[in-house]
């Protein structure tokens, strides 16, 4: 995904690990300089239309400025890959508590997501995690069954009725 910081400062907002862009070494916050050898600008609607149409092509050449100021070129070819929706998981300490933290990228089909979620929660349980942070910043939604599964991992059905409504809002 792309995000515009300013008219001529288009940055890569997100790169899926394992995607063609990820394998090519592109990363979050790289500044897009050229698409197919054409300078990138977003100062007019035609510039924006060119950027959008280019991103839908099956092949594309991107030139970016990396965080260290170097320039890199990536020739990307559209390809199929499997998104791992759970990544950057960590166990953090907050005082005497252990906090499980992970980025949950997308609510893909449960058949794709269940194993990754189960692994994360098993790791957290093994580490003695008592609190949880789930980052959903770039999550654009998806399958309801997957959302339900995640909710049940966080607050299992065995907890139903254990918290009174009045306790939550008083």
Image (spheres, helix red, strand yellow):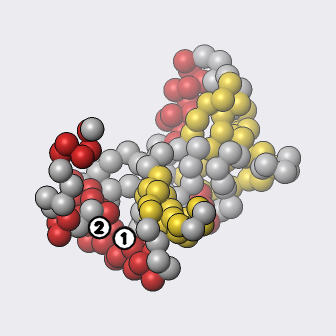
Q: Horizontal and vertical percent for residue 43?
A: 65, 18
Q: Horizontal and vertical percent for residue 62?
A: 67, 47
> Which residue shows up at 47% across the image and 77% down it?
128
| Nearer-the-camera pick, 111 or 164 | 164
Closer to viewer: mark 2 or mark 1: 2
User: In which quarter of the view is residue 46 placed?
Assistant: top right
**Residue located farthest toward the left when viewing the structure as drawn:** 161
Drawn side of residue 64 relative to residue 102, left or right: right
Drawn side of residue 87 relative to residue 6, left or right: left
| Nearer-the-camera pick, 144 or 101 | 101
Q: What element carries label 2?
A: helix
How packed mark 1 is, by other alpha carbons closer than 10 Å (few <14, some 14-19, many 20 or more), is: many
Q: Can the viewer see residue 99 in this picture?
A: yes
User: In which quarter of the view is residue 149 placed?
Assistant: bottom left
Residues at discs 2 and 1 in contact (Cβ within 8 Å) = yes
How packed mark 2 is, by other alpha carbons closer than 10 Å (few <14, some 14-19, many 20 or more), is: few
| Nearer-the-camera pick, 95 or 131 | 95
Q: Of marks 2 and 1, which one's residue comes earlier in the chain?
A: 1
Measure the alpha-carbon separation of dots 2 and 1: 8 Å
Q: Horizontal and vertical percent for residue 133?
A: 46, 57
Q: Can the viewer see residue 149 in this picture?
A: no
Q: What element carries label 1?
A: helix
> Which residue corresponds to mark 1?
117
> Which residue shows up at 60% across the image and 63% down it?
95
| Nearer-the-camera pick, 4 or 137 | 137
> Which residue corresponds to mark 2?
153
Quadrant showing the C terminus: top left
> Which residue shows up at 44% across the image and 68% down it?
130
**Residue located farthest toward the right when viewing the structure as drawn:** 69
User: In which quarter of the view is residue 156 placed?
Assistant: bottom left
Q: Horizontal and vertical percent for residue 4?
A: 62, 30
Drawn side of residue 114 relative to residue 51, left or right: left
């Amino acid at each position: 995904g792309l995000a515009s910081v300013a008219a001529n400062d288009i940055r890569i907002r997100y790169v899926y690990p394992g995607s063609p862009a990820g394998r090519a070494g592109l990363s979050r916050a790289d500044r897009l300089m050229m698409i197919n050898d054409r300078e990138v600008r977003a100062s007019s609607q035609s510039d924006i239309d060119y950027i959008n149409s280019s991103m839908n092509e099956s092949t594309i050449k991107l030139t970016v400025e990396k965080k260290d100021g170097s320039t890199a070129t990536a020739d990307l070819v559209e390809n199929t890959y499997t998104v791992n929706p759970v990544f950057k998981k960590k166990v953090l300490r907050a005082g005497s508590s252990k906090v499980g933290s992970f980025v949950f990228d997308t609510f893909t089909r449960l058949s794709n997501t269940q194993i990754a979620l189960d692994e994360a929660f098993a790791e957290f349980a093994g580490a003695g995690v008592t609190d949880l942070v789930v980052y959903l910043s770039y999550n654009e939604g998806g399958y309801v069954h997957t959302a339900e599964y995640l909710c049940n991992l966080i607050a299992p059905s065995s907890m139903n009725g254990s918290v009174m409504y009045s306790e939550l809002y008083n």
